[in-house]
Amino acid sequence: MNNLIATSIKYQDDQLLVLDQYQLPHRETWLPCDSVESMVAMIRKLQIRGAPLIGIGASLLLARLAEQGVGPAQLESAAATLREARPTAVNLMNCLDRMLAALRSDGPAALPATAERIFHEDIELCQRMAEHGAELIAPGSRILTHCNTGSLATAGVGTAIGVIGEAQRQDKGIHVYVDETRPLLQGGRLTSWEMRRLGVPYTLICDNMAAMLMAQGKVDCVLVGADRIAANGDFANKVGTYSLAVNARYHGVPFYLVAPYTTVDPHCPDGSAIPIEQRAADEVRGVGGSFGEVVWSPEDAPVYNPAFDVTPAGLVTGWILDTGVLTTDDVAGGALTALR
């Protein structure tokens, strides 16, 4: 493969490297990824994360294995193992399906070029979403976002943060409120890091402060990403998104999701059919990162820890996709299923 360089993943000099997002923002450490087992471990530990990026990472790994001479049967098995690493994020499945189609049609030699196309396509998709979304951002807007949806989660400029970055480039004078995003703090650790890199003025808040900001009239719109969009417009995203949507509706704040067509699952009729990953109890009992490990609850405290929640389509103002902005009427008319 040719060299492929993004903010948090790169294929360079015949080596696949992943930026360890678990160590951000205090340490920027690149880790080699040369096996299915290491990629699965990185996905589950959130060293590589973001629905688009994990699909890209899995594709690049399969391509690398093919270049090393791994045969079709082993590549099929590798794809099956990778598919189970993040059950909610449909981008992973969509990317693997494209890789397997190439494998079955033209053999292992076709995988490097297919992975490169997936990588470059994501960059283009991100730019289109950014441009479509920025048209909705009025000058001086105060934007609330959740989790991390930027270049750390994609090969390009990102989804929701891609829109924010484009609005900043257009000198719209925006300000961003960043949810910390419990329990793993992707907002506090990663989105804050990205806001600084983009030069976007921001304020970090605890998740439970968002409603108060809306009540004070300090939020003009909410922008979030998605890990899977059902055919009816319901979508799964980092847990806490549903609460934002409910609060935004109550306070009359426009609520947008930003995602590429690869996040749409036309075979999933509605949100009730989206699989929700349950994660380790220790993530709620405490927190870990480059700063070490901290436990604040009883060590045997019972825990409920879904990684995602589902937001009903009825709470969404608009779906900002690479193809344009869909309204409630568009989605009700089947516009999402027509994308795939």
Image (tube, rainbow, N blue to C red):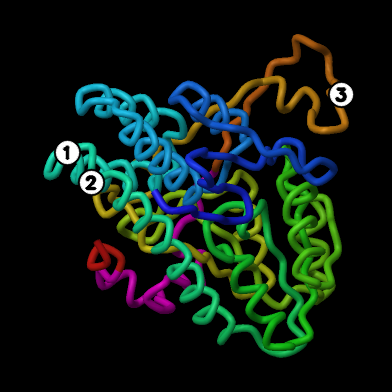
Percent across and percent down for residue 146 are 67, 56
Who's the residue at 65% across and 53% down the image? Answer: 148
**Could you tell me the amino acid type at mark 3?**
Val
Residue under label 1, please give it.
Answer: 107
**Could you tell me the amino acid type at mark 1?**
Gly
Q: Is residue 298 above or below residue 157?
A: above
Q: Quadrant of the C terminus?
A: bottom left
| Distance Cα–Cα, label 2 vs label 1 | 6 Å
Percent across and percent down for residue 294 are 86, 23
Label 3 Cα neighbours within 10 Å, binned few <14 / some 14-19 / many ≥20: few
Percent across and percent down for residue 22 are 71, 36
Q: Is residue 85 left or right of residue 43?
A: left
* Label 3 vs label 2, nearer the camera: 2
Along the line of sight, the residue nearer the viewer: 307 or 126: 126
The earlier-in-sequence mark between 3 and 2 is: 2
Residue 47 image-quadrant placement: top right
Q: Secondary structure at mark 1?
A: loop
Who's the residue at 84% across and 23% down the image? Answer: 293
Q: Secondary structure at mark 2?
A: helix
- Which mark is drawn over residue 294? 3
**Could you tell me the amino acid type at mark 2?**
Ala
- Which mark is drawn over residue 110? 2
